[in-house]
Image (cartoon, coloured by chain):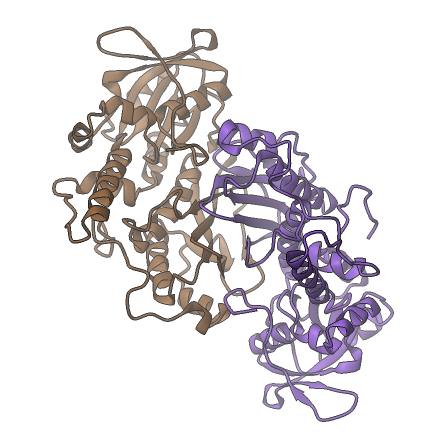
Chain colours: A brown, B purple
Amino acid sequence: MAKTPAKPKAGQPAQDPQAAPRTEIGSIGEFPLIDRLTADLPIHNADYTCKGVGDDAAVLQLPKGEKLLVSKDLLCEGVHFDMTYCPLRHLGYKAVAVNLSDIAAMNGTPRQVLVGIAASNRYSVEALEELYTGIRLACDRYHVDLVGGDTTSSAAGLFISVTVLGSAKPEDICYREGAKEHDLICVSGDLGGAYAGLLLLEREKRTFLSNPNAQPDFQDFSYVLERQLKPEPRTDIVKLLAEKGVKPTSMIDISDGLSSELLHLCERSHCGCMVYDNKIPIDAETCKALDIFDIVPTTAALNGGEDYELLFTIGQKDYEKLKDCPEIHIIGHIVEAAQGCYMVPENGPMMRLEAQGFDGFKQR
Amino acid sequence: MAKTPAKPKAGQPAQDPQAAPRTEIGSIGEFPLIDRLTADLPIHNADYTCKGVGDDAAVLQLPKGEKLLVSKDLLCEGVHFDMTYCPLRHLGYKAVAVNLSDIAAMNGTPRQVLVGIAASNRYSVEALEELYTGIRLACDRYHVDLVGGDTTSSAAGLFISVTVLGSAKPEDICYREGAKEHDLICVSGDLGGAYAGLLLLEREKRTFLSNPNAQPDFQDFSYVLERQLKPEPRTDIVKLLAEKGVKPTSMIDISDGLSSELLHLCERSHCGCMVYDNKIPIDAETCKALDIFDIVPTTAALNGGEDYELLFTIGQKDYEKLKDCPEIHIIGHIVEAAQGCYMVPENGPMMRLEAQGFDGFKQR
């Protein structure tokens, strides 16, 4: 994907919501705040968006023959992000990106988002503007219209709730079910990077907490930091599949780690899987970062979350169409349910896959 | 509207999220929790809902010639609700109801909701089930499909984010703009009740905090308590308007008080208004409750929030069609912008309307 010059850079110092200039949210009121945050919003999808922000509801339309896709995700401070190292602009970008990923996972095209924000009085108007800068960047980059939302105060912390709407022709929609025996299992991009980035950020947080004058040491790790702080939804893969004339037999996005998502897909498709350790795509920088923490790269790929790559299955007949796509990796194949879900290492015995992925409710 | 026997009753003791039996959310994990909360969801709108909960996104469709309406609202503990006196079942019901009201305010019909919940570990699985019982009651009562959402943990407090989708024929959709000079200003139901209920609940909270053995004194105030704890969206008014063949020239729902919403509507329609004190509908029980607190009923109607009635304007030609509807009250008329926005009391000088309504960011 082409990089836009206005993109936020990972690894820059976290925003200080207390930093000057500071306008208290309570001093301007809800409606002027919303006006300020949503001024001059562009419409990228005029065929889909009739009326955006500014009334009791947005008014949208769906071209004939298309279905509507809708999903929502909540990001909570202290659970999904840490303000110590997560710049507000990245956070806004990520909140939109992870939602767009859900539409990509249906083999659809995202069209609109609605953003709800609840912020404590620790956050200023300027802080929310910074958050919205990231939200707008993601919307512009992915040609998605911001059509509504809600901005309110919270008793403590920052909460970002994004709803995404997308569209697809009914015959193109991919569900989690649908994988069949002998289908090939594919992943886009590479895995484990977001988790490696998180480990680095957590390490620097500990250093910072013990010595607030310490400068963060992120040299040579810009890729894994971007993977954690600013994931990109793989809408490009959806386009590529359409260009190649391939419809996956099943698809899901990888938010909780490859292992957890493979198990989901197999459970829903009533099948098993066999994936090969040496086929799982992992970036060299990810391996280098994980090495610092003595973590085996495959473990991070299987159980680290937030890569937001696509996991999908294709019929064997489509192998030739995708085998030369550098962004798509065939990591295994579907077997019958009775055979279970296993990873095959280069050396050593087969390993049963277990869901140890990220879970918002479990201790991390 | 017919009352369903399963409706929660206002004024019952608030749920204690610590009450036994108690299953820790962390003990069952996110996916089993979502399965438990969303088991056996009915589909009320098969023409609109293709696939609900269970994949990366819900799949919906829109019958030919209809537009999609979408809106979202966030409710935050300690800001929009107080767990001291807000039963979880009512809270779930209200979270859905206030969103449905936004679709009614566009003169549309709600079809689906998505619910995002972030809860701290103070909340048990049983507490979330109670919340979902209210969510399901509202969905069943208003024939709306629960098609998706997100359930996660929060560092502190309970956050409920609801997205509502609805539909309308394009020619039926009402915006905030559109009111014209000489149009009649109408409100549904009655006003000020939700604020009166809030005052009573806050009073009983203070009593309870100073004497935990005190029993709440809510005798004779079940109506205003229901107005606060369990508002009903006026989808019945949308149906009535269609039956009578009336399309409002502008419409908004009253969430922040009549005054604030009238100013909104006039600002967006580039007009002024003249409303008559003695025409504003206020229930006798509301007056009785407000009397305890020495509050003039009109003040509560103008500035108290959360009534979720509809405020709309109609052309004079439609007067005959609505004049005998007991749930619709004509409270004034639209004037040109230069004349401003005023309330005319029975005695005394005209009063300029000011927006002092509920505002999530201002001190209450």
Q: Is residue B171 above or below residue B18?
A: below
User: Which image quarter: residue A146?
Assistant: bottom left
Identify the residue at image location x=68%, y=52%. Answer: B212
Q: Decide if residue B82 is in sight here.
A: yes
Q: Position of residue A335 (x, y in %)?
A: 41, 10
Identify the residue at image location x=33%, y=47%. Answer: A82
Q: In what quadrant of the picture does the N terminus of chain A appear?
A: top left
Q: Is residue A1 left or right of residue B47?
A: left
Q: Is residue A128 left or right of residue A290?
A: right
Q: Position of residue A125 (x, y in %)?
A: 38, 66
Q: Decide if residue B238 is in sight here.
A: no
Q: Is residue A278 left or right of residue A42?
A: left
Say which of A304 and B11 sits in front. B11
Q: Position of residue B249 (x, y in %)?
A: 67, 71
Q: Is residue A145 above or below residue B305?
A: above
Q: Is residue A73 above or below residue B75?
A: above
Which residue occupies the extreme right position in the image? B324
User: Which image quarter: residue B133?
Assistant: top right
Q: Is residue B168 left or right of residue A150?
A: right
